[in-house]
Image (spheres, rainbow, N blue to C red):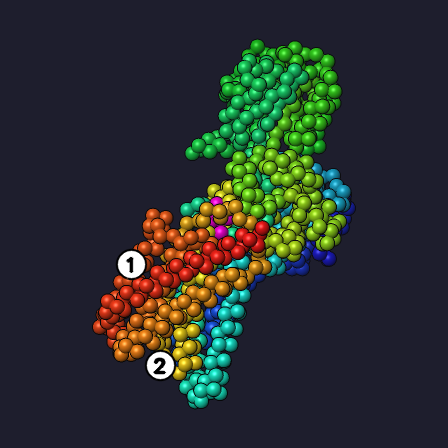
Amino acid sequence: MNAPSPIQWHAQSAEASLQQLDSGPAGLDLDEAERRLASHGPNRLPERAGPGPLKRFLLQFHNLLIYVLLASTLVTLALGEWLDSAVIFGVVLINAVVGFIQEGKAEQAMRAIQKLLTLDSRVKRGGEVRQVPAEDLVPGDLVLLDAGDRVPADLRLLETRDLRIEEAALTGESVPSDKTSQPVTRDASLGDRHSMAYSGTLVSAGSGLGLVVATAGETELGRISHLLGSVEQLQTPLLADMARFARQLTLIILVLAVATFAFGILLRGYSASDMLMAAVGLAVAAIPEGLPAVLTIILALGVQRMAHRQSIIRRLPAVESLGAVTVVCSDKTGTLTRNEMTVQRVYTAARHFEVDGVGYAPQGAIRPTGDLAHDLFELARAGLLANSASLCEVDSQWSITGDPTEAALLTLAGKLQLDSEEEAARLPRVDAIPFSSERRYLASLHRDADGSGVIYLVGAPERLLEVCDQQCRDGADEPLDPRIWDEVLDEGAAAGLRMIGLARRAAGSGQHELDHADLDGGFVLLGLVGMLDPPREEAIRAIEECHSAGIHVKMITGDHAATAAAIAERLGLPAGNPLTGADLDDLTDAELDALLKETSVFARTSPSHKLRLVERLQAIGERVAMTGDGVNDSPALKRADIGIAMGIKGTEAAKEAAQMVLADDNFATIAHAVEEGRTVYDNLKKSILFILPTNGAQAFVLLTAILLGLTLPITPLQILWVNMITAVTLALALAFEPAEDDLMERPPRDPRAPLLSAELLWLILLVSVLLTLASLGLFIHSQQLGWSMETSRTLAVNALVFGEIGYLFSSRRLNGPARFGLMDNPMVWGMVLLIVLLQLGFTYAPPMQSLFGTSGLGAAGWSWCLGTALLTCAAVEVDKKVRTRLAGKARR
């Protein structure tokens, strides 16, 4: 039998579907079911084997900068410098272990999706209803569905009785979908295929019988799993920048080493072995061994700070990714909105009311205030009594049981202080007809103690207008005026509201049962209510912050276009015509690319649409963050530059596919995360700009000494001391720098721009030259004064370190003036004090003198070192002012 997935089952009749799968009213016989199970395999989503622990660990070393560090380890081993080798390799190993731990769950998303399949299903086989494990289902099986069941496979519905299925995790639809056995059009989107029940969705009401048409990987859930497995996870901006930087640094080091080797042999007449050792020493000096450790620690600190602001980072480099984001693609339901249906407006024949408050909490004013009309209370009472939902408050949080639409009517009654127990006691329910998707209404019959009865009808306005011939105005009944309600429906549609009508009719004195014949006419229309899944107030503010930071926000949802457009307007997203999933299918990539800049709302989208939108935005040069909470969001979450899942309402599949999880499900947290990400990137750049001149100065000192034929002013072990102890310690102080004042007013950084611009490279060169002149100059000067080699080298190292200290204060601001304050970052002065103490130990402690070949300095030596610190800081500040002035002239 061919795989059924290409067939448009939703457009076929039930009879044709049964015939095509060789099934019938009694279901498959047991033998046929066994044969099909052997043919199709178990109803389980395929697991994709990820790399094993060893391979994942080895992949942590797959980076050019790491290769350079490993090569330097081998070189120092060849030179017999065991201590140097151990220190360098220790840094590499720590970096690999941290990455291994952080990225250990990269392939768990598909296993999380598998948990959505039920363990057992009720199946009709051989004319009997049996309990069958979900993994044993095969195409052609007949599955019975009841409220509370999770759909075990893709089903073509054959019979339905008031069947409603919660599909938010698959389609993004905020309310349960009404199901029917009637076929729909072939081009119907996933959310409009009312004749289908999809694997992994939840039956919220009613019952049904469905024909299994797809299992395992052929289901819609399986297609998402396949998309997720085939999605390429992009490098974070930081890793891309660091890879580019590593290539540039490696090239510079190799060129310098080769040039030094050639110069010594060709122009100075040194032996090849001597110059090889010199070139290797130069390479060791130029390699920033401490940089990976500094980056890892800064990122880890950023992770901790973001966790305190409800943002949980799952992959360490992702901590700064939001700082580079140019577009945030957000799911609507549960992310920008509360996923709680709320009555926004009430329309009666006499008056229109605005309802305050959001969510299911029965709190909020109804405007206009004052003496609220009798009609309003009568309408709210009808919604309260003709209701099967319930509200409860747990830990100050209101939650519902039952249908969200009915719960919204309960909340409206609560805002009018109507007590459900009192109303039910006064007018108890006698009989009811549950909501029917075919008839689009529900009804209930009530009788009071005197025997008077009333029938309440709640449903689609178009259906109620057919059975109402009167309307209620100020407590009196009058003939129905269709023009009033046509205008109301137009107003509600323009606002994107879901309109519900409520009506009543007196019941006969002896009537104690309801049937559909009792609902064919004679009703009085009480009014209409317009409800909406309201936007989060904090999301509105967060979108404003994103716009001010130069970040575009786009809403991608499975909901209807009109509803999505109305929510977008309330959220403050740019107006425009929404694009639907059907529109996306008709557009070529080039046509879609042209529309992406001006379109902010995408409606009725499927998982593949979301993935395509993320990919096309990336294709036109955007850095994309994707937020979501459903299974349907998982492929796009994984593909995005940074995927952001909701921690409370998000599915496990979404969380595992994402790089970041919002612990409070609050879109506003993204704005905080953007600020934190930009701060982390700023501090990373400051740390890199601080460390590199140290390596540059050491390389220049050695290179100049070789060129001049001098004894090396700094030994290799002293170089490692400066690289791994002093430079790293001081650089870590920059990890605690607070955000600069204009951080959230800057546009996102250009993803194509190099980590180090020409301006910053000039700064590195300038500081490198300053430190070289100070270190080498003081070394030569002290030698001319007759100092010992050990003392001169100690002076050269201390001059280098004190120059770093002076440069540290300038590094606290990339463009602003140097900062010397204590309170905004106490770590700076703390690290300076620590380094001074370490250098005193380096200079005077006998064990350190023995290990590093140092000697004590006098007052003159320390005064020269202090002067180096002051002059370095002053020179960098002058350079900043000159560059700022030149940049200002260029802008004018």
Give the x, y percent position of residue 34.
65, 56
Q: Nearer the viewer, residue 860 or 314?
A: 860
Q: Which residue is mark 2?
A: 711
Give the x, y percent position of residue 177.
65, 38
Q: Amino acid at mark 2?
A: Thr
Q: Could you tell me which secondary element the residue under label 1 belongs to?
A: helix
Packing grade of label 2 (10 A; few <14, some 14-19, many >=20) is few
**Disc number for residue 570:** none
Give the x, y percent position of residue 144.
63, 42
Check residue 675 for magenta coloring.
yes
Q: Could you tell me which secondary element the residue under label 2 belongs to?
A: loop
Mark earlier in primary sequence (1, 2): 2
Rendered image quadrant of residue 37:
bottom right
Reply above or below: 745 against 458.
Answer: below
Report whether residue 123 is seen.
no
Packing grade of label 1 (10 A; few <14, some 14-19, many >=20) is few
Rendered image quadrant of residue 704:
bottom left
Q: Amino acid at mark 1?
A: Leu
Residue at x 30% of width, y 78% of height: 784
- What is the span of residues highlighted in magenta in the rendered image? 672-678
Q: Which residue is mark 1?
A: 833
Residue at x 60% of width, y 37% of height: 572
Reply above or below: 236 against 650.
Answer: below
Rendered image quadrant of residue 457:
top right
Q: Nearer the viewer, residue 617 or 256?
A: 256
Quadrant position of the N terminus in the picture: bottom right
Numbered circles on residues, count: 2
Residue at x 70% of width, y 48% of height: 595
